Image: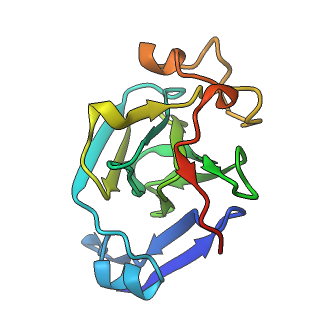
Amino acid sequence: MTTFCESLAIPDVKIIRPTKHGDGRGFFSEAYSQKSMEAAGMESVFVQDNHSLSADAGTVRGLHFQTHPFAQDKLVRVTRGKILDVAVDLRSGSPTYGKHVSAIISAEEWNQILVPIGFAHGLVTLEPNTEVLYKVSNFYSADCDKGLLWNDPDLGIDWPVNADEAILSAKDKMQPRLADLPNYFEYKGG
């Protein structure tokens, strides 16, 4: 499998494009290969696959993260529909602390996004009946499950849905703002 990898404006967040081979029958793709990921410089070991369906466009999930010792790298892809995916740097001391990057991830583009430990992750669906699959490098822990308010004005995220129309869980409506978050992660430089 050939995997193409490119860094976003915050270089630790990466877009992955697995090769897709098509013919008259359909297509084949190695959606994930540990060997290809390692060759591209990514060494995450994933232990769990998660799958979500959002019935309506404008569904917001996030911004979520887990703290140590259950912090997670996430590898996110879309098998049906399209999302705007967002990663917010929460690493204290990082030159991009509190900044974010975003990318369109879609079934049509067959792309993925790698969101590493130290980032809050969120998305909004751009099409109805969007299915998102993501691999995580650690198991779920209710005690370490944290969040950040999706529309905190200090983040400056240009969501394609306004707060009155966004479909959110009750939990996501009540997350703290960045200014109120403890320092859960440290930037290690480099």
| Residue 116 in the image: above or below residue 65 | below
Q: Is residue 29 left or right of residue 93?
A: left
Give the percent coordinates (x, y) of residue 116: 49, 59
Closer to us: 138 or 37: 138
Residue 158 visible, this orientation: yes
- How many circles with numbers are drawn on the protein? 0
**Front residue of 102 and 87:** 87
Which image quarter holds the N terminus?
bottom left
Residue 128 visible in the snapshot: no
Q: Quadrant of the C terminus?
A: bottom right
What coloring was used for the rendering?
A: rainbow
Q: Position of residue 122 (x, y in %)?
A: 52, 39
Residue 105 rendering spot, x and y as whole percentages: 52, 53
Which residue is found at the position 64% from the left and 11% from the top? 164
Residue located 35% across and 37% down the image = 144
Residue at the image point whose x is 27% and y is 38% from the top: 141
Vertical comparison of 41 with 31: above or below? below
- Residue sitting at x 55%, y 37%: 126
Q: In the picture, residue 24 is in which quadrant? A: bottom left
Left or right: where 96 falls relative to 67: right
Q: Position of residue 20 (x, y in %)?
A: 38, 75
